[in-house]
Amino acid sequence: MTFANPGYLFLLLLLIPIIGWYIYELRKADASVQISDTTPFSEQPKSLRIYLLHLPFLLRVTVVILLTIALARPQLTNRWSSESTEGIDIMMALDISGTMLAEDLRPNRLEAAKQVASDFVIARPNDQIGLVVFAGESFTQCPLTTDHAVLINLFKSVEYGMIEDGTAIGLGLANAVNRMKDSQTKSKVVILLTDGSNNRGDIDPQTAAEIAKTFGIRVYTVGVGSYGQTRVPVQTPVGRQYVTMDSEFDETTLRNIADITGGQYFRATDNNSLKKIYEQIDQLEKTKMRVREYSKHTENFAPYLIAAVLCLLLEVIIRYFVVRTIAN
């Protein structure tokens, strides 16, 4: 039930001073007849009028409540709606090569990419999302799925060293395209994140981009890395050591992949910019939704109005014919 004029319900606040005044008047009322001892009357049965003494006031309060509800115009609503959603297929191609351990992003590029990507997945419950990882080779960590809890757990298990080191961008993209080429969804997207230049694999990145274009797949490419030099941990016979490297990669190739497929290229130089990139992609690839809604309102104030009139009549009858009092 809804109300056409809900503001009238604030009139119910008037009941607070009304009830307070009634209690105050009861306390200051004096007895009509004063006697020295009431003991002889203590065991006398109480008449029905005693029990009905406060009923007129309670009926008056009820009348105020019912009239207020009637003024607010309660309405019964018959509503139906139909909603249809069209999810988007998204494959995430993630570079897990050794340079992704660079610590210009915190705690490093790989962990920052995993965390932001997981947040992106959580924000898109209607989409099928999958994960491909690549370094010197590529494999599917998770096929397209709507079970995002499983996908996020698989994201957590991704780490450097799962596959041979290197950067096979073309192979990673081709693997992602292969996983979604047979999808019947109208909107198909690959988000490819890397910090290197293609140096492994049998498939050229531009060739993989042309294949993606053939299947109507847009590719958003994300280059990760700050400008200048950065430290990268490496494992040596004497333990973990840090080496300094130039934070450079093949931006031209990443731009070309995005241009060929109708996507966009982004550069993430820190955690905050990486998060904003995924927010931009989220806005660019919103799920399509159609909603039809129908509502029918039926006025329902009459029962409250009738009940108020009946309570008022009952109050008059009781007040003037049943519990009539003698004024001082």
Image: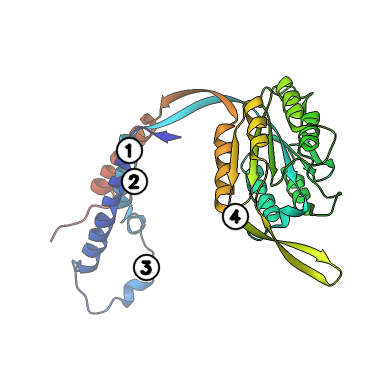
Instruction: Provide the secondary structure element on which disc 4 rests.
Output: loop
Task: Give the alpha-carbon distance from disc 1 to disc 2, as whole Å.
Answer: 7 Å
CB of mark 4 within 8 Å of CB of mark 2? no
Mark closer to the chain start, 4 or 2:
2
Mark closer to the chain start, 3 or 2:
3
- Image coordinates of residue 21 in percent, x first then y, are 22, 59
Mark closer to the chain start, 1 or 3:
3
Instruction: Provide the secondary structure element on which disc 1 rests.
Output: helix
Closest to the observer, 154 or 237: 237
Which residue is under mark 2? 62
Closest to the observer, 7 or 92: 92
Instruction: Provide the secondary structure element on which disc 3 rests.
Output: loop
Which residue is under mark 3? 44
Q: Residues within 10 Å of mark 3 (few under 14, many from 20)?
A: few
Q: Residue furthest top?
A: 214
CB of mark 1 within 8 Å of CB of mark 2? yes
* Residue visible at 83% across and 45% down in the picture: 136
Task: Give the alpha-carbon distance from disc 3 to disc 2, as whole Å.
Answer: 32 Å
What's the mark number on residue 308?
1
